[in-house]
Amino acid sequence: MSTIAQKKGFGATLWDYLTTVDHKKIAKLYLMAGGFFFLLGGIEAMVIRIQLAVPNNNFVSAGFYNEMLTMHGTTMIFLAAMPILLGLMNAVMPLQIGARDVAFPFVNALGFWLFFFGGLFLNLSWFLDGAPDAGWTSYASLSLASEGHGIDFYLLGLQISGFGTLMGGINFLVTIINMRAPGMTYMRMPLFSWTTFIGSALILFAFPPLTIGIFLLMFDRLFGANFFDVAAGGNTIIWEHFFWIFGHPEVYILILPAFGIFSEIIPTFSRKRLFGYSSMVFATVLIGFLGFMVWAHHMFTVGLGPIANAIFAVATMAIAVPTGIKIFNWLFTMWGGSIKFTVPMHWGVAFIPSFLLGGVTGIMVAAAAADYQYHDTYFVVAHFHYVIVGGVVFGIFAAVHFYWPLMFGTMLNETLGKITFWLFFIGFHLTFFIQHFLGLWGMPRRIFTFLEGQGLETGNFVSTVGAFFMAAATIVLLINVIVTSVKNKKVGVDPWGDGRTLEWSLPSPPPFYNFKQLPLVRGLDAFWIEKMEGRKRMTPAEPLGDIHMPNSSFTPVMISLGLFVAAFGVMYREDYAWGLPVIIIGLVITFGSMLYRSLKDDHGFHIHKEDLQDDDKKGVEA
Amino acid sequence: MQAEEKMTLEQWPAAPERQTLEAKNKFLGFWFFLGGETVLFASLFATYLALKDKVPSPDHALAKDLFEIPLVFLMTMILLTSSLTSVYAMYHMKNFDFKKMQLWLGVTVLLGFAFLGCEIYEFNHYVHEYGHTFTSSAFGSAFYTLVGFHGAHVTFGLGWILALMIRNAKRGLDLYNAPKFYVASLYWHFIDVVWVFIFSVVYLMGMVG
């Protein structure tokens, strides 16, 4: 049955993807949409760097620069990094734990479409009323004063896509708790599944405060509420708290999966089991827990007082301990291993010192007293780009190369991959290392230009040159993807030859039901154990039987589309008479589709044993 | 075992809401959802406490001027009773007695509507007697957002339970719809718990100043 999909026309393929509930296809949707927004966010970054290349530049106006800066941050965090990571989780995690799909395939599709329509809505602001311009943090005192509808696009777009992320988090939690293969105990679970698990728990508890914060700001801007209006008794600091109670766990939602990715790649290409597995798990849980205790370190200069600042400073520095454990474990995994320098391993090795630099400056900005000096300068910009790019984006690039065969059945070109790596690695340090010093020399964040003769020219120019290197690296990756897809040279089981975990025991790409018979897991690195004992495949844990599969559905698109429509109504309610009817139409579509989903029975279907045996004869193995 | 299969009392398992893998997932997933909802309401409570009695000028009504215990006590009793009746409904669900389950769910829904009616009256009263509106002060915004979010949850719950009752009226219980009834009743309990906090934090604490 898996071979049929390749022979369909464009319309049928499109319909297939619009209605799919298969985690592997949803993963591809996430990667495509997330990749598109990554390019968009990258172009925005280039505009920022071109504007700042020379002093007194007028490449863009001050107002447009604010929009670029806001959309760069918002797009990269919410519409690029998060979805690409959710895509990778979708592609890999169910296979890693030996499941046939996620717990809620329908909700999985709904999560994607909510993110997609939310992202689309946010970016339509470019063509309608101008993009949001209050920074990605959108502090209330600034965003309430912003004219036009830019901020409203930010609020409604993020609200819609945030619902999707929340659903994705719940889905992964339940999948990991309920659907592990026989023998896959928690302490045998690969690290990427563990980090998905903890990351999902963070999503569950971090996104609701953002949801509320966004609601409050939306009520203030569009419905005349006074939450942040000091004249009416409001308090503008409430937004900052909600934003960072969400925002700080958010950076761990981003970095933990990247840690997981490197914890898969480094053992695979060191051909040695992960050093200190249980301490890695412990460190992951601890980072997730502490991640909720540190939000006020973003607010040291707000004036919460020395006691609050001291507590949050100490809690923040405490996170260095579990992170340090991880760094040492990766190093010890490589120590004495038989290292193979593939493209993913290049990223893995480069990640350690790059991320470490971000960690060290993290300790510096965590010192509350010193932070008054660093605050709102390029030092902070350098710090968070070192952790987000040096950690998360390196992780994403590594994972895209590593898991490409698993998702698409073909390998990305290694030479082009190495060119991408070196260009990006050099460009990254060129761009951001100098920004530490720019910050210390006094260059503030979020300014659209700077004056001559203040010692900032060289540093900014170097930084811009670095950005072009990163852009070139991304273009090489795109060429690599196109070349590889055109050649489409198929690979078989275990394409890297050193796969350790369950996903590599499957054909590349796996059949749509993943495992014909659920595998029996006998320890950590389940597939490696079998290979060491001379077997080429996993031992099945069950006899061949019928497999229950979920039905495809168009309803997720409809539910998301309804909210997308309603969002326009909410925004233009006060400007145009059609606002209110559009809200009603949108909500009717959404709630009607939910009702339809609730009332219409959906029992799924069964793949019969006989068909599975037929697949065997055609050479499709599970 | 097919989830949609017709069953008899003898075949009916002790935990019909967790019999299939789909049902187990739904059960656990819904608990996680309620975890997220808890954080959502916690955020609203925090906002309310930060903005309680924060008004632009002294002539605005404050919490101690607005709230009257008899009405909200009645609402509390109505909602607590509706939680009890939904427990009866689930008791009958577990005993495979579809008619009695529907009956008790019906009572639950009626009590829910009664609660909603009281709330609408209450809001109307504040607006017209005291000029305490959503836009009049930060206090008003926070109050109506917190209590209104709860009211919206009640409304959604009523629609949900009614839809389940009507959809399944003719076919009775099976292992496909039992988990649906069960999570709807969990949701109803959650709304009730949130109200207990609203009653304590907003109304009782509002009375004492």
Image (spheres, grey):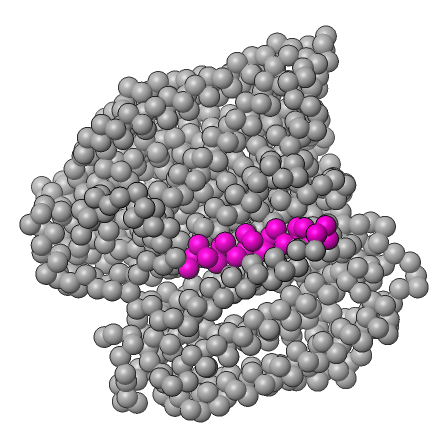
Magenta residues span A555-576
Question: Picture coordinates of residue A350 (x, y %)?
Answer: 40, 24
Q: Is B92 colored magenta in this rendering?
A: no
Query: What residue sits 66% from the left and 55% below the top?
Result: A579
Query: What residue sits 73% from the left and 13% below the top?
Result: A451
Query: What residue sits 70% from the left and 85% below the top?
Result: B74
Position of B38 relative to A490 (above/below): below
Left or right: where does residue B62 sit relative to residue A111? right
Question: Picture coordinates of residue B42 (x, y %)?
Answer: 63, 61
Furthest residue toward front: A577
Furthest residue toward right: B59
Position of A422 relative to B185 (above/below): above
The image quadrant of residue A601 is bottom left
Furthest residue toward top: A453
Position of A548 relative to A337 (above/below): below
Question: Picture coordinates of residue A558 (x, y %)?
Answer: 46, 57
How many marks do you count on the picture? 0
Q: Is A563 colored magenta in this rendering?
A: yes
Nearer the observer, A116 or A528: A116
Task: Give the dominant element type of the magenta stretch: helix, strand or loop.
Answer: helix
Nearer the observer, B162 or A542: B162
Position of A431 relative to B158 (above/below): above
